[in-house]
Image (tube, rainbow, N blue to C red):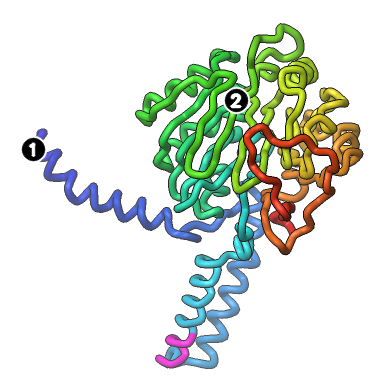
Amino acid sequence: GTILGHVAALPASWIALVARTCSSLPYATIPWPTGWLGVVLLVPVVLVAWILLRWIRRHHPGGLSRRTVLVGAACVLLVIGTVTIAPPGRRGWPPPDWVLVACDVGQGDGLVVPVGDGSAVVIDVGPQSQPMIDCLDDLGITSVSAVLLTHFHADHVAGLAGLLRRYAVGMVYVNPVRDPIEQADMVDQAIKEADVRWEYVRPGDVRAVGDVQWEVLWPRRIIRSGSVPNNASVVILMHVSGVSILLPGDVEPEAQVAVMASTPQIRADVVKVPHHGSRYQDPAFPAWSNARIALVSAGLGNDYGHPAQETLDSWTSVGAILGRTDLDGDLAVVVSDGVHPGPANPGQAPSTSGHPEPAEIGLVTRSS
């Protein structure tokens, strides 16, 4: 029986290979609604096909000429090639000289920083893997040098397993505060199955991948008020192409105050607004950050009311340019002469890393 099974596996493996390859081709399948809506929509499709067939039989009783068939096939191939190579949603994306993209992963976080040669550093991976994978593919990312997970809530880590299956990942950095434990165990399992190197992050850690450098500012202690996992989020100050980026995860007011106290002077050109722009924010945080661009990662129509209007107002009041994934889709921070640089922020404290401030920094949205 084993011998017969191995013999049968040869043609079966070829069938499986053909199926996997064809199903992964662009537009191999067409999304179609289920239930009565799908049936109703199918009626006009069948009707149009029937009318077209009748028209062909009436005007070409002997069948279509070879020239007509060739022209039609060429037109079909042209359309397929155009939408495959440069589909409407990807044309002009990513913008040149991008240094950070906040991916539209729904109600969650997923950020990408390029390190060159089709590789990137990923900060959080969203609640599902496919939106994050789509974002990385659109950016031309073929490998992930490092994944940083700010904390273990599902909207930041649940997409990890799919990401690890899809890309070669060099290192996974995880939060030492394993809360909630169920999600921490899920991350452990995904890392183990992918056989990827990993390590805990500690405050004061300084790491570099290519020209991208980052320093871990938090957590220095566990805060037993508010949400413990949120307040234990890894807070990172990252530098790329002369741009300083503050990534504070989901820290709430208690941890925001502690971070500001431990780092009284900071220069962050870009800030990912904590906790998806919820109303739980310390009012001094925007001015302390000195940010010229503030990114809000939230899902459209989410049940939490993110982002809160008072939070948005607090960032615009300090002159920051706001970007929202729920309204604008993917958000790209760019360094270029052709973008609006944002407010100058006079009196801005110098970065302790010594990185110069870029001449031009701006925000490009997927919907623009």
User: Contact (CB < 8 A) between labels 1 and 2?
Assistant: no
Comparing labels 1 and 2, the label whose residue is closer to the camera:
2
Judge whether 148 appears above or below 340 on screen. above
Name the spot of residue 107 as percent of width and height, x first.
69, 35
Tell me the kind of residue under disc 2.
Answer: Val
Q: Which residues are magenta?
A: 66-71
Q: Secondary structure at mark 1?
A: helix
Asked whether residue 264 is drawn in magenta, I would say no
Q: Residue at x 60, y 22 (%)?
A: 151
Asked whether residue 70 is drawn in magenta, I would say yes
Quadrant for the C terminus in the image:
bottom right
Q: Residue at x 43, y 32 (%)?
A: 171
Q: Quadrant of residue 324?
A: top right
- Mark number displayed over residue 216: 2
- Label 1 or label 2, whichever comes before in sequence order: 1
Identify which residue, 220 or 274, lies in the foreground.
Answer: 220
Tell me the kind of residue under disc 1.
Answer: Ile
Name the spot of residue 11 as percent of width and height, x first.
19, 51
